[in-house]
Amino acid sequence: MRRGKQVAAAEKATRMSHGPLMAGALVVALGALALPVRAETVITSHGISTFGDLALPADFTHLPYVNPDAPKGGEISQWAPGSFDSFNPYAIAGNSAALSSIFYESILSGTLDDVSAAYCLLCETMEYPEDRSWVIFNLRKDVTFSDGTPFTADDVLFSYELFRDKGIPEFRAVSNAKYQSVEVLDPYRIKFTFAPGTPFRDMPAQAGSTPIFSRKHYEENNRDLEKSSLEPFLGTGPYVLESFKPGQQIIYARDPDYWGEKHPLNIGQNNFDRIRIEYFGDDNAAMEAFKAGVYTFRNESLPKRWASDYNFPAVTSGDIVKEVIPSGNIAGGQSIIFNLRRPQFQDPRVRQALGLMFNFEWSNKALFYGLFARVNSIWENSDMAATGVPGPDEIALLQPLVDEGLLPASILTDEVPMGSVSSEETNLDRRNLRRASALLDEAGWPVGGDGIRRNDKGERLRMQMVHSRTDLLPVMNAYVENLRALGVDASFDIIDDPQLQERASPPNFDFDALPTTVVNGGLEPGSVLKQAWASVAKDNSSRNRMGYANPAVDRLLDKVEAAESRAELTSVIKALDRVLRSEYVIVPRYYKRDNWVAYYNMYEHPETLPPYSVGELSIWWYNAEKADALKARGVLK
């Protein structure tokens, strides 16, 4: 049984109009009285789960992974790269500040230990039918915005309409058609009705996930969701903006009048009085600042640094804690993507050849201290990754697409492609070089007298890659060396963040290839996949930078949203993974299996952390005695 009470509600009779049809309508109506009235089962609950029951009962007092007695106070500080010029994370324009969505809440809230669940935060309960074709949120009456003004259903309607009309194009293209109507029933009740033909499984949770803004503040201050701004919108969240130095520093302060302090979802959370972000031009400067105590918590991403640079006195003395925290997350999908709008990447044999030249094994040994793991699948480190040949469940999904000529028959019998395996002793693997050469010869890109491959038009096989991260230079330069040995006109250039954003985003897409992460939708993929892989998002989505479009994949994406069980979802994602990998649209790279964190020894966390987040900004806390001891020894100012 689902948690929450279930109420049987008879369907409302259709109103009959006066006129010639009255007699016929009356006969039909009288006849219907002899038939049983079809009942619609309406579920009233404190949340919703994609599959199965909610783990927490309606009367839960706090989340299972928090310390409900965690003290409030102190400051935690971290670093961010580059710069910022906006506190609007919902616009294409501008470079939004780190944590700039911290001001906003949504009707429903997820947890860090259950990817399927969404619980009422701004609502008391929610009502929805078994088919999830609509949802009513019964809103809390004690919620206020951070300026003390009340929150009502009208603010929810306003926020929905704002994102519907001014949200980023990739969101509007995928989302807007799914809603039939949104109506305010009273000041604290709002109903979302979803469009017929929409897969309804995720829709109540999606409707409840919209960030909520104050209509009054937005309109009175002539704000614009599509423009960058150094003034945040007004939200209901636990933190407000205390101060900032443009491009250098941000301080978020815990709101002492936050409405939700005692909400069960917030007990043991939001423990720091201040969250400070310091900006640095590169990671080397940021590391030196950490050692000097300029900021106090560091998530390390570089294996070389983790292996060799955390041996300074504060670490050896225990004043800084170096900790490995296991991660249950799906791999980040780090890859090199091709710009499929470019003619040289139209042939999958070309893409396969270029992928063969990336040597993970040598890179991991020589550059990464053996700390990274290989990415093979877009859903690596999960049970959704395709393996071997397709099983019966995948074949049932793929066979109709083969029959319609949308996929080659080989997809039903071939092993799913894996990342190339290379020698760890030398960067250039001769076996892979020979395989790649043969593929390019077949695809019409022979080597010329100058060692460069050209097609029959005399055009060079070019692969110019760009990024702003200097730490990528060693591994990307090694890849470029291999590509040049293959006869490719390859390069990797470092550009600044604003230029990267401009070149890599719609409508420009001005690159040949790009090291980045591909969207996999996490451990429970849903509609976000359409923003990354659907044909409708080919030229308007920052999540579909490669310009991918395939009608077979569009059909599978519809089935992702329509899956009615976890097993069904897993099968669809496996089939989707198999199709995408068979087209060699990415060069898979590597991922970090654990979280590497270092912090000044004044922070504490629950003994058992949730599997899907370190949670340092939400469920950790400040130990004032330890902080005073560090200051007394001169470790911190």
Image (tube, rainbow, N blue to C red):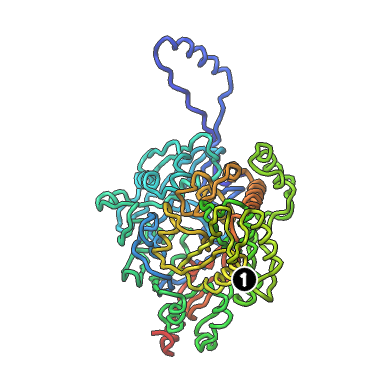
At a point 35% along the width and 50% down the height, the residue shown is 151
Residue type, mark 1 in image: Phe
Indicate left or right for 561 with 414 as reference.
Answer: left
Q: Position of residue 289 (x, y in %)?
A: 42, 81
Q: Residue furthest front?
A: 449
Indicate left or right for 401 with 282 as reference.
Answer: right
Q: Position of residue 100 (x, y in %)?
A: 39, 62
405 to 513, vertically: above or below: above
Which quadrant of the rendered structure holds the C terminus? bottom left
Q: How many marks?
A: 1
Quarter holding residue 84: bottom left
Residue 46 visible in the shown view: no
305 to 161, vertically: above or below: below
180 to 587, vertically: above or below: above
Q: 446 or 555, which lies in front?
A: 446
Which quadrant of the rendered structure holds the N terminus? top right
28 to 505, vertically: above or below: above
Q: 146 or 36, which lies in front?
A: 146
Q: Position of residue 254 (x, y in %)?
A: 37, 66
Q: Give the SS element for disc 1.
A: strand
Residue 312 visible in the shown view: yes
Q: 442 or 473, which lies in front?
A: 442
According to the image, label 1 marks what residue?
372
**Disc 1 crowd, CA 10 A, few/some/many (<14, 14-19, 20+):** many
At a point 51% along the width and 73% down the height, the residue shown is 471
Q: Position of residue 182 (x, y in %)?
A: 41, 39
At a point 34% along the width and 54% down the height, the residue shown is 144
